[in-house]
Image (cartoon, rainbow, N blue to C red):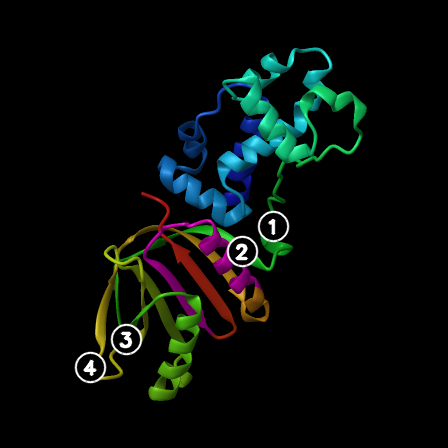
């Protein structure tokens, strides 16, 4: 299944029903996952939450409706329960009130998203579905408060265990401590390299795979910052380093 093609079906559905009620549960059916996981999936691949995207598309297109409809009617079509709440959102988006829209020409406009269905040929990363069998990783771990701490942990671990520098493939695995919210980060291999290795069991299932070339490592950092800024809470997430490539796996499918 082509992920980009499925997302384009989501965008098509949104455009066809832009001023009607749009249930996220309905959108999730195009991807084949739960509503909550769809929200994570959408944010990972677009950089925007699904609700933010729909809101911005409605506020972009509603200008056309104001010419022939009352403001309260347009507010309802855009999903607002009052003229006041719509006017606040409209002004925050466009910079002026809907009552004076005809006196302004500098409208903000967010275009419909559309993925090239051969995106993998033109993008710094490739996204796809992948099925992962249950696996065991042997490694070392550290509880980290943020991604800066994780970077330091990588450097320290590779200095302490030179064997990692020679490994054909190695892993980073992130879990979240539900008690304090810190990240539990593991670095390891598929075989033991120390008698004191921690053992990490990776659950089987369908994952979202985002595949990078290491030449685009800055894009990985950008994606990581986007995930953090949007509080995308999906664990475990897995990093697989092999040669000049990095594959990020997110378990966003049931």
Work out whether residue 128 or residue 156 is closer to the camera in this orientation and state it: 156
Mark closer to the observer (4, 1): 4
Is 142 in front, or is 133?
142
Is residue 66 left or right of 147 when viewed as pictured? right
The earlier-in-sequence mark between 3 and 1 is 1
Q: In the image, residue 122 lies at what x, y percent?
A: 65, 55
Q: Circle 3 is placed at which residue position?
A: 139
Q: Is residue 78 visible?
A: no
Whole-number angstrom distance, CA of label 4 to CA of label 2? 36 Å
Q: Which residue is mark 2?
A: 126
In front: mark 3 or mark 1?
3
Query: Which comes before the other along the chain, label 3 or label 4?
Result: 3
Sequence-wise, which precedes: disc 4 or disc 2?
2
Disc 1/disc 2 C-alpha distance (Å): 7 Å
The answer to whether residue 211 of the structure is visible from this angle is: yes
> How packed is label 2: few (under 14 Cα within 10 Å), some, or many (20 or more)?
some
Q: Is residue 132 shown left or right of residue 27?
A: left
Q: Upstream in the sequence, badge 1 or badge 2?
A: 1
**Image x and y of residue 127, in percent:** 50, 52
Whole-angstrom CA distance, mark 3 to mark 1, is: 35 Å
User: Label 4: how many residues lie within 10 Å, few (<14), some (14-19) or many (20+)?
Assistant: few
Span highlighted in magenta in the image: 219-242
Of circles 4 and 2, the one toward us is 4
Upstream in the sequence, badge 4 or badge 1? 1
Pointer 1 with pointer 2, Cβ within 8 A: yes
């Amino acid at each position: 299944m082509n992920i980009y093609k499925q997302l384009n079906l989501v965008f098509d559905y949104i455009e066809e029903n832009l001023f009607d009620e749009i249930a996220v549960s309905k959108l999730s059916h195009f991807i084949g996952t739960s509503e909550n996981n769809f929200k994570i999936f959408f944010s990972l691949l677009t950089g925007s939450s699904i609700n933010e995207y729909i809101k911005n598309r409605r506020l972009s297109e509603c200008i056309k409706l104001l010419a022939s409809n009352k403001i309260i009617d347009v507010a309802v079509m855009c999903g607002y329960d009052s003229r006041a709440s719509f006017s606040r959102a409209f002004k925050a988006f466009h910079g002026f009130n809907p009552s004076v829209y005809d006196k302004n020409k500098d409208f903000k406009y967010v275009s419909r998203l559309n993925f090239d269905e051969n995106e993998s040929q033109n993008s710094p990363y490739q996204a796809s579905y992948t099925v992962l069998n249950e696996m065991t990783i042997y490694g070392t771990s550290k509880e980290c408060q943020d991604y800066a701490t994780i970077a330091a942990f990588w450097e320290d671990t590779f200095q302490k265990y030179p064997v990692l520098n020679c490994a054909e493939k190695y892993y980073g695995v992130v879990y979240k401590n539900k008690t304090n919210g810190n990240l539990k980060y593991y670095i390891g291999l598929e075989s033991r390299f120390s008698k004191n290795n921690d053992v990490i069991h990776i659950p089987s299932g369908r994952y979202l795979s985002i595949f990078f070339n290491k030449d685009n490592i800055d894009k990985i950092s950008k994606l990581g910052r986007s995930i953090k800024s949007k509080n995308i809470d999906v664990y475990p997430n897995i990093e697989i380093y092999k040669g000049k490539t990095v594959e990020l796996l997110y378990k966003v499918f049931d």
